[in-house]
């Protein structure tokens, strides 16, 4: 299989995301908070959360709303998943800060 891109996996994920957003009727903040809940439920790694930080900020999501989502889903997904999600969100924020710092330095 030949691709015209050096990042075919990222390109595919980006295309899937764009398609999902275009087909979804949810408001941006509701869409992103729903995705965060899904990430927590699926035990996603920090990088998955990192991809949602900038769009979440643009949509006006607050740390309190993210915490509320974790509280809301805890009885469904379980304590371990929620604690892992909280740690992964914190790690994602660290990644975002490091990237922003690197961009400022350049």
Image (tube, helix red, strand yellow):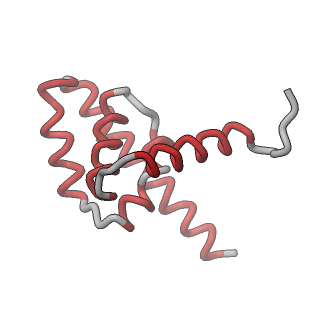
Position of 52 with respect to 33 (left or right) is right
> Residue 66 location, x and y as percent?
24, 50
* Placement of the N terminus among the 4 image quadrants: top right
User: For the point 44% across and 61% down, which residue is it?
Assistant: 54
> Residue 4 location, x and y as percent?
85, 44
Asked which quadrant contains residue 82, the reply is: top left
Task: Give 9 or 83, whichever is nearer the viewer.
Answer: 9
Position of 17 with respect to 4 (left or right) is left
In this rendering, the count of numbered labels is 0
Position of 52 with respect to 26 (left or right) is right
* Placement of the C terminus among the 4 image quadrants: bottom right
> Residue 10 location, x and y as percent?
65, 43
User: For the point 53% across and 50% down, which residue is it?
Assistant: 18
User: For the point 62% across and 70% down, which residue is it?
Assistant: 103
Task: Give 9 or 99, whichever is nearer the viewer.
Answer: 9
Task: Give 98 or 67, whichever is nearer the viewer.
Answer: 67
């Amino acid at each position: 299989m030949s691709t015209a891109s050096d990042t075919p996996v990222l390109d595919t994920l980006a295309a899937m995301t764009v398609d999902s957003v275009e087909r979804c009727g949810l408001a941006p903040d509701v869409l992103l908070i729903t995705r965060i809940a899904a990430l927590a439920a699926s035990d996603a790694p920090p990088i998955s959360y990192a991809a949602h930080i900038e769009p979440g900020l643009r949509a006006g999501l607050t740390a309190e709303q993210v915490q509320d989502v974790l509280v809301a889903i805890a009885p469904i997904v379980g304590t371990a998943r929620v604690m892992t999600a909280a740690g992964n969100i914190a790690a994602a924020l660290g990644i975002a800060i490091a990237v922003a710092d690197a961009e400022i330095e350049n």
